[in-house]
Structure formats: structure tokens, C-alpha cells
Image (spheres, rainbow, N blue to C red):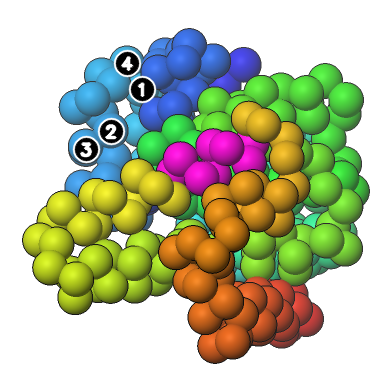
Amino acid sequence: MKFGLIGAGNMGGTILKAAINKGFIQEKNAIVFDVVKAQTEKIKQQYPDITIAANNLELAQNADCILLGVKPVFLAGVLEEIKLAVRGKAVVSIAAGWSMEMLNNGLGVDHGAMLLRVMPNTPALVGEGYTALCQETTLTNEWMDWAKQLFDCLGTSAVVPERLFDAVIAVSGSSPAYIYTLIDAMALGAVKEGMPRAMAVQAAAQTVLGAAKMVLETGEHPCKLRDDVCSPAGTTIDAVDVLKDTGFEASIMAAMKAAANRNREMTAK
């Protein structure tokens, strides 16, 4: 099976490297194209047995599975270029805002490809990603199993109905930015109390990592874990009280709503 990657930037490149490094894809079976030559040169240096295609069409003609790693604004042009070479092949898109209907329309009538919409997130770069695979795929069961194994190389994956993809964008796609904002605020608070900046960032980031791991590994509800930290008349309950009074939870939920709404707008175009 020949795996083709169009767009070898941060996310596309990460998917390819994770799959190769975990032995899921062999270098000799991978074909890559990116309009930025420096991207493909970098990959070729790291993985000498990879084939670099001359253009999108050549890649599509020679690959059995085509992963579209280009930015959403460029996807229409790429689909136009490859549409005559995708019959019988698996085409996987990671572009935000591109619904299954839009992908079908982009390839045109009777294109004959099997399609899958996927939404990974940036923590995939460190092997802790969350990827949603669209339930309404036209992949065969065998290809869908293969796709799930591919994205499991990045962390965790789940099959999600397309109607929930706006929520996926809000809760996993955009949310790393919320967490970075939280870490920065925590670090600034520690700096204000006298802690050196680098130490404060490390302490805040490690605490967020540990708290997330507690949720995943204990299976406890986050509110239960929060309550466990809140000793009677202690420091934490006072801090949580301030968070509630200043609208912390409401702000996060409003941010998620804004992200979901923006994704709906993009999908509607």
C-alpha cells in the first residue's frame, strides 16, 4: 500500500513521522508533495527512502491513500488538481471547516474516491493528540480500521458523528489555546508571588499535565477531583470561589461556543 501526503507542514508532517516512527508505514511506501520545497527536503533528509512527488497529480496517481494536509484555504485547488486520479482510492482530509459534502463537491460528480473527514489537534506533535474521525465516511471497514490505527499513532482517536464536529473543534481543536492561556495566567500569578518566570511556567505546565492525567487514569469526574483538593477552610476553596465569582467557567464555555460557531460559518461556505 502506497501512502501519499499532500502538504508536509506541521500537522501533515507530524502524522507521517509518527506513522513511520511507530512502524505503521514504511518509508519506501510513502510519497510526499509540498509546494514549499524546504518541507520535502527536510523530510527526505530524515527519511531517505521516501519518494518526493513532482506535483499533486503525480502523487495522487501513485498513492493508494491520499492524506490532504494542506490548509483549508488551499484545499479546493488541490481537489481540483487530483480529482481525475482518485477513483478507488482513500482520500483523507484534515482541513477544518470542510464537511463531507464539501469534499464530495470539491472532487466533482462521480469521482469514485472513498472519503474520510478527520480533525486532529496540535498536541499530536508530542504524541498526545486527540483525533476525531467522521462516522459518515465512505471508506470501507478495512480502510476505516487502517485510518484509526494511523491516527492512534498520534495519541488517541475516536469515531464521531459529523454533527458533533463543531463541538470537536471547540473541545479539542481550538482548546490547546485555552490551556496555554491558563498556563500563562498561572505562571504570571506565581511570578507576582516571587517565583522566577521559567520556574513558574514549568510548575504550571506540569500541574496541568498531571491534572489531566488524573482525569484520564482515575476515571473520576473532574468536579470530584476538584472537590478532593478543596480542604475545608483551605487555600483551594478560596481560589475556586474566586474563579466562580469572576466567571471562569462561563468564559471557557463562551470561548468554546465562539469556536464552534466559527466552524459552522466555515462549513456553511
Q: Residue furthest front?
A: 233
Residue receiving disc 2: 43
Residue receiving disc 3: 41
Q: Earlier in the sequence, mark 1 or mark 2?
A: 2
- Total of numbered circles in the picture? 4
Spot occupied by residue 201 in the image (x, y as percentages of width and height): 24, 57
The answer to whether residue 215 is magenta is yes
| Nearest-to-viewer mark from 2 and 4 | 2
Rendered image quadrant of residue 126: top left
Q: Residue at x 24, y 49 (%)?
A: 202
Q: Amino acid at mark 1?
A: Ile
Residue receiving disc 1: 50
Q: Residue at x 34, y 67 (%)?
A: 186
Q: Residue at x 25, y 19 (%)?
A: 48
Q: Residue at x 56, y 55 (%)?
A: 231
Mark 1, residues whose alpha carbon is within 10 Å: few (<14), some, or many (≥20)? Answer: some
* Camera-side residue of 71 and 50: 71
Q: Which residues are magenta?
A: 209-216
126 to the left or right of 192: right
Q: Is residue 17 visible?
A: yes
Spot occupied by residue 135 in the image (x, y as percentages of width and height): 87, 45
84 to the left or right of 12: right
The secondary structure type at the circle numbered 4 is: loop
Spot occupied by residue 138 in the image (x, y as percentages of width and height): 87, 41
**Marks 1 and 4, how far apart in space?**
4 Å
Q: Is residue 14 above or below residue 28?
A: below
Q: Amino acid at mark 3?
A: Glu
